[in-house]
Image (cartoon, helix red, strand yellow):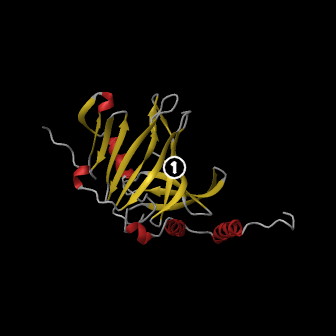
Amino acid sequence: MRCNQVMPLAALAALLASSIAMAAGLTAEQIADKNAAARGGLAAWRAVDSMKLTGQMDAGGTPAVRLPFEMSLKRPHKSRLELHVKDQVAVQVYDGQQGWKQRPFLNRDDVEAFTPQETQAAADDADLDGPLIDHARKGIRVELAGTETIEGRKAYRLHLTRADGRKSDLWIDTTTFLDVKMDGEPRRLDNKVHKVSVFYRDYKTVDGLKIPMTLETVVDGVRQSRKISFQGVTVNPALSEALFAKPQPA
């Protein structure tokens, strides 16, 4: 660097913070604490009982089709996804114990139960603050597995072990301490199991909470990735329990 070039103070501070963290040899618990602080604070996340997100998601095809959606989340583990396909609405709901779906665009108007794999994925996704926030309360063990470079940025790699023994990895930016990547649920395609990675991008502050506004899912061996873009986020909206109730036969 020439003497007449001055590094911006913000960039210098971020570089210094990262260097200090690496030199200090942070533990997994310390990284988790810094992640919670970077995302708005543990107390702030504990105060979140519900969340509603709207946006668009990729639905495949060439060219790619983008579909509008609404997702409602409510503690402890409830979720409702409404996907708008032309003039029809597909619904996927998890009530904390079981899930069901309706897919009228496939001429499936009947209520279909989730598969065991869909139920497990829904249970994980309905955890509106992610696995690292309050991980001890959730019965998730966290271990540090070193650092890696993710999309040009250095990140801590954390091994997560859930109470039921399932394992996955989560990567935390060493500078911002925000989530940058996480293992997704593996997918079976062509009789082979493919690794899935979810990337978190475009963080914005909503009511004091840091929220990634873009999620990109990449499946090993699959050329086309899938993106979810959030356009609106509402914290603690009033959500009726009826939203998560399974329709009763007429």
Compared with 31, 164 (above or below) is above
**Is residue 218 among what the camera can see?**
yes
Q: Residue at x 36, y 53 (%)?
A: 126
Compared with 54, 75 (above or below) is below
Q: Residue 61 appears at what percent x and percent y?
A: 48, 29
Image mark count: 1
In the rendered image, which quarter contains the C terminus? top left
Compared with 124, 226 (above or below) is above
Q: Residue furthest front?
A: 87
Q: Quadrant of residue 113?
A: top left
In the rendered image, which quarter contains the N terminus? bottom right
**Is residue 185 among what the camera can see?**
no
Q: Residue 80 appears at what percent x and percent y?
A: 32, 48
Label 1, secondary structure: give it: strand
- What amino acid is labelled 1 in the image? Thr
Q: Between residues 42 and 81, which one lies in front from this camera angle?
A: 81
Residue identifier under label 1: 214
Q: Residue at x 27, y 30 (%)?
A: 108
Q: Residue at x 46, y 28 (%)?
A: 190
5 relative to 157 in the view: left or right: right
Q: Residues within 10 Å of mark 1 (few under 14, many from 20)?
A: some
Q: Residue 160 appears at what percent x and percent y?
A: 47, 57
